[in-house]
Every structure is written in structure tokens, then in C-alpha cells.
Amino acid sequence: SDVGASLDEEDVSTLSQYITANKGKDTLFIMDGYDEFPEKLQEKSLVADIINGKTLPQSSFIITSRPRASAPLHDKIDRRIEVSGFGKKEIQQFIGEYYGESSSSAATLIERLNSTMPR
């Protein structure tokens, strides 16, 4: 859920002051879809300053992005995790485990997926 939706202006101000006073210590920013951010936002903005450690240097962040678009970040991050998609075999295994190997729902879904997936 969106925590910000339940905070009023005073709460946001207090939270912002706390984060700033502690230079981001114990703060985790999650930036989803970094590759979809406008180029200007990636290069010169509060977001860029946080990632580059100029602002809130003790904060942590998780960034999701397509691999190619995240290449400029590689020298700025401590750890990189790449999630690759499922292959046909893994999809069938997952569906079988989710629905149960003997489930007709699993068999129907696998059959439909097989008819639409490239060979």
C-alpha cells in the first residue's frame, strides 16, 4: 500500500526533517522503473543526488530497471541482482506446483500457454 497516502502534511514534514537530520541513516528508498524516469531526472535531480551519495549519503535504495538502462548505475551501487524470466520448463513446473500436478486447471493453463508461446 502507499504509505504516503495516509500521511498528512505535518507527518510528511516531520518525516522529511528526520531523514535529513540523520543523513538518510536507516532510510530505504525504492525506485521502481528507473529506466522509465525522464533522462533529466536521472542526471540532475534529488533522485540523482541520492543515488550519487551527494544527498542523504547514509541512505539505502533499491532500484528496478531493465538491465541495459541500469548500466550507468553499476559503478554507484554495492550490489546488483538480475532477475531473468522463466523458461518454458520453469513455467510448467511453477504452474504444476501452484495448482498441484494433477489439477485440471494446471493442465488447461499449460496447454493454453504452449499454444501461444514461441517454440
Image (cartoon, rainbow, N blue to C red):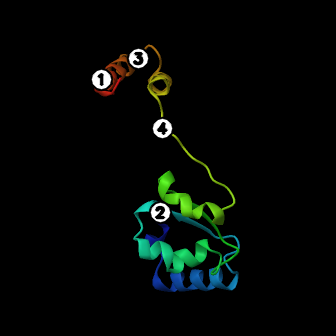
- Mark 2: which secondary structure? helix
Query: Gap in Å between the C-alphas at discs 2 and 3?
Result: 39 Å
Q: Is residue 109 above or below residue 51?
A: above
Q: Earlier in the sequence, mark 2 or mark 1?
A: 2
Query: Gap in Å between the C-alphas at discs 1 and 3?
Result: 14 Å
For label 4, the crowd category at 10 Å Cα-Cα, with few meaning under 14, some 14 to 19 and many 20 or more, is few
Q: Nearer the viewer, mark 2 or mark 3?
A: 2
Q: Are marks 2 and 3 in contact (CB under 8 Å)?
A: no
Tag on residue 47? none
What residue is shown with label 4?
A: 85
- Mark 4: which secondary structure? loop
Which quarter of the figure has residue 56?
bottom right
Across and down, in percent, residue 16 comes to 57, 82
Query: Gap in Å between the C-alphas at discs 4 and 2?
Result: 19 Å
The kind of residue tagged 2 is Tyr
Tag on residue 112? 1
- Mark 3: which secondary structure? loop
What residue is shown with label 3?
A: 103
Q: Earlier in the sequence, mark 4 or mark 3?
A: 4
Q: Are marks 2 and 1 in contact (CB under 8 Å)?
A: no
What residue is shown with label 2?
A: 34
